[in-house]
Amino acid sequence: MPKRRSTTGAALGAALLMAVMGTADAAQTSPATAGQHPHRQPAQGQHPEARSDTARTRQGRLEGVTADGVTTYQGIPYAAPPVGPLRWRPPAAPPTWTGTRTAAEPGPACAQPEVADSAEDCLYLNVTTPADGADRAAGARVRARTRSDTPRPVVVWLHGGAFSSGSGDQYDATRMARQGDVTVVTVNSRLGALGFFAHPDLPDSGAFGLQDQQAALRWVRDNAAAFGGDPGNVTLMGESSGGASVCAQLTSPNAAGLFHRAVIQSGSCLQNWPKNTLAPGDPAATYFEHQDKLAAKGRGALGCRSLKCLRAKPVKDVLSLNGRFHQPAYGTSVLPHSPVRALAAGDVLRVPVLQGNTRDEHRLFAALFTLDGPMAAADYRRLLTETYGRRQAARIARAYPPGATPALAWAKVGTDRSWVCPTLAADRLLARHVPVYSYEFADRHPPAPDLHPDFPLGAYHSAELPYLFGMGDLRLDDGQSALSRRMLAAWTTFARTGTPGDHWPPFPHTQQLARNTPSGVDAAAEHRCAFWSRNS
């Protein structure tokens, strides 16, 4: 079996807070801290029945590993290492090689604090594709497949992690590739200050991480056929900050033609968080920022008066700037306009969109407010007043009374106001121009981190990920496995056809994904969106 990086998130106290809140400075955290999955511990090791297989890309021949019905090629460079004079420049052409390059291990994760083997040289991707002769579960039949058959849809996965942490190899795409008969590509792109630094002397800076993603999509266009994939049928898919990246790419003219469908999981461009929402004392947050504002933060950074000085700084020094630089910049060639305004204006690529949330998104963050003890009703009312002002707080408290567990009321406020209702608003804007399919992941007892023994996480932010990917040693029970199969069928059918299946009507229908029979849900009513349209 191909090797995958193993990282263990902390379970309690300050260590858990760091795991959930990503790698930003203590004084500032990003809105997509949500993307740091709280229980990543990818599988690793060797499969006793593994064999090698090869593919020829434009750069040279690769030798991958075949096991469990899929062939995986890891650590493939899709751009030149962005180091030395290439730091804070658009991604350059990838290297070529003669002979056969072994692709059995992932490349380094992009540089991030607390991950010892992360590196600035990190622009690598991984490909997982059904092996020749594997079961074709999507067609409910078994037959040998050769590369002369119809090409498979390609799914390109952008991981979450606050635009500051994570890596593509932490998501095992074996089940998705094998069941859905798709080719899956997981991508590393520059993070934090190495990916989103801006400076007055760096024109067009602040979106290097998004440029990396576009370079990966161009690599897929040029090389998908070598793995049995269809370069004319590419789905761009991501969760949390990865989902926000997908949303941003929908508004980027430079991404036109590079993907043909979009899946946005808990990452709508319109999501935003008032102060105190993500963690106690946290400032208000949005996904994106204007380039001029970010460039002003870059002036004089690390005591440097020149880019030469900045490019000579060690990586650990640059990472100390992550708290200032964890938002993609707009007002650039990559994002000419704010993605929020682009959605409102209809300036989006004309591709079908599958978008949704988990039912209890904000419980993962509300749990942070209970680490030092239960939240009292007085604490809840104080937070509402500090966050929303006295008059609005009184209205919210009437609509969301503290009840027996005030932290759950705080979680409900955050889920509805900052996650779900903005996503539904984005659905309405997108549906004016493209087909949109809406979902709510609602398994109330998913695999969960041991965050707090008395705090029910429910369908928390990122809870759907183990249903789509292998996530280390996490295992699904029978009911969860059945839901996983239904979700994988819907996601890969969407990748194949642009719809998640005949049973799933387009927006304004929202499909609820739970262990029982799939059904629709009035998400706007469930999450009090009419109230928030009057009180945001």
Image (cartoon, rainbow, N blue to C red):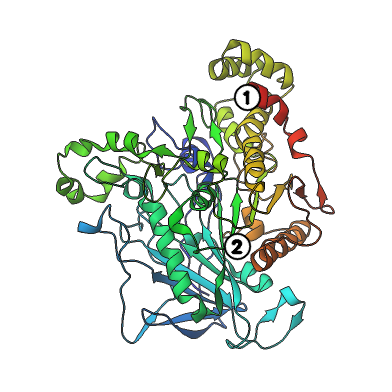
Quadrant into which the C terminus falls: top right
Quarter residue 385 falls in: top right
Quick check: can you spot residue 180? yes
Q: Earlier in the sequence, mark 1 or mark 2?
A: 1
> Residue at the right extreme?
517
Q: Circle 1 — which element?
A: loop
Instruction: Look at discs 1 and 2 and give the one toward the viewer.
Output: 2
CB contact under 8 Å: marks 1 and 2: no
Spot occupied by residue 101 in the image (x, y as percentages of width and height): 37, 81
Spot occupied by residue 390 in the image (x, y as percentages of width and height): 59, 11
Going 67% across and 40% down the picture, which residue do you hit? 424
Whether residue 322 sits left or right of residue 153 in the image: it is left
Which residue was labeled with disc 2? Answer: 470
Residue 43: which numbered mark, if any?
A: none
Whether residue 391 sits left or right of residue 386 in the image: it is right
Position of residue 435 relative to residue 53, above or below, is above
Spot occupied by residue 258 in the image (x, y as percentages of width and height): 49, 64
Q: Circle 2 — which element?
A: loop
Spot occupied by residue 357 in the image (x, y as percentages of width and height): 65, 45
Quarter residue 193 falls in: top left
Local crowd at mark 2 within 10 Å, few (<14), some, or many (≥20)?
many
Q: Amino acid at mark 2?
A: Gly
Which residue was labeled with disc 1? Answer: 374
Q: Amino acid at mark 1?
A: Pro
